[in-house]
Image (cartoon, rainbow, N blue to C red):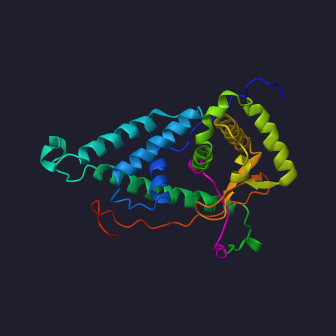
């Protein structure tokens, strides 16, 4: 394989609302009472990681970052000092809360219907009879989203933060080399945890190249990232025999005012 740097071109298909919902769920926050300082800081951290990886960050992500910072700054002002446009709403977060609740409702419904359609393609009734779907297992493997992978990438970077100066003299790696290395490892081991994938790496450059190589293998359907439990260890598997599972359709409680107890 050529030693020239491998250029990974990836589109970020998930949007800013997806990232906010991911952070809210990951941190177990109340969607109706979002701590703006915490969520803004984490959102910007993820944007910086995406830029570091040279992912195609759409302008909508930057617009949302500006919106979060604006809401955060307005919440520091007493109600009487806020701009006139906000007088009708006591909480500057309310418009964002409405967007998130509505988006989550339609996203959950769309994912559920899409999974049902995929499963239905492999179900055949006898003599034209309707097939009855059995109960879903309590635990199922779920495909890991981009933000889960970026979270694992962030944790790996934190472990080498104190050793950044080593990079000046460190061996240089390429994404192409790491794609070949991960491909060989998948053929030998069939699966391994993402923490083991980063184990022993002592430079941010090597971690970034390895992560980009993983994203490229996933894009090419050569690898698959899965979790046995929500926010548990991520496993990288050789992409074969993939079975689609149906996510539960969660009924969204009626939106109340920010800060309400649901």
Q: Position of residue 130 (x, y in %)?
A: 68, 73
Position of residue 174 in the picture relative to residue 113 (left or right): right
Q: Note whether 239 is above or below 250 in the view shown.
A: above
Q: Nearer the viewer, residue 200 or 29?
A: 200
- Location of the C terminus by quadrant is bottom left
Residue 51, placed above or below residue 245: above
Q: Residue at x 74, y 67 (%)?
A: 124
In the picture, residue 258 is in which quadrant? bottom left
140 inside magenta stretch = yes
In the image, the segment drawn in magenta is 133-148
Q: Nearer the viewer, residue 106 or 217?
A: 217
Taking 27 as reference, is 186 left or right?
Answer: right
Magenta stretch: dominant secondary structure? loop
- Residue 55 place in picture, x, y as percent: 58, 34
Percent position of residue 139, x then y: 65, 70
Left or right side of 222 for 252: left
Q: Is 217 covered by the magenta stretch?
A: no
Q: Residue at x 55, y 37 (%)?
A: 50
């Amino acid at each position: 394989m050529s030693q020239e740097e491998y250029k990974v071109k990836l589109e970020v298909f998930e949007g800013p609302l997806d990232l906010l919902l991911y952070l809210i769920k990951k941190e177990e926050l109340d969607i109706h009472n979002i701590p703006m300082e915490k969520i803004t800081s984490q959102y910007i951290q993820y944007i910086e990681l995406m830029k570091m990886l040279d992912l195609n960050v759409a302008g909508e992500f930057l617009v949302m970052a500006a919106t979060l910072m604006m809401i955060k700054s307005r919440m520091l002002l007493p109600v009487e000092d806020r701009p006139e446009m906000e007088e009708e709403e006591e909480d500057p977060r309310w418009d964002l809360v409405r967007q998130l609740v509505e988006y989550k409702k339609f996203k959950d419904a769309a994912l559920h219907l899409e999974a049902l359609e995929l499963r239905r393609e492999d179900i055949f009734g006898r003599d034209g009879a309707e097939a009855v779907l059995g109960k879903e297992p309590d635990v199922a493997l779920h495909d890991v989203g981009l933000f889960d992978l970026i979270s694992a990438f962030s944790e790996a970077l934190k472990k080498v933060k104190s050793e950044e100066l080593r990079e000046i003299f460190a061996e240089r790696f390429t994404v192409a080399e790491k794609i070949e290395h991960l491909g060989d490892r998948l053929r030998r081991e069939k699966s391994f945890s993402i923490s083991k994938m980063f184990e022993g790496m002592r430079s941010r450059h090597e971690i970034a190249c390895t992560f980009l190589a993983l994203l490229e293998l996933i894009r090419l359907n050569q690898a698959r990232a899965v979790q046995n439990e929500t926010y548990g260890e991520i496993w990288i598997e050789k992409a074969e025999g993939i079975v689609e599972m149906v996510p539960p359709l969660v009924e969204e409680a009626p939106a109340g005012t920010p800060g309400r107890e649901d």
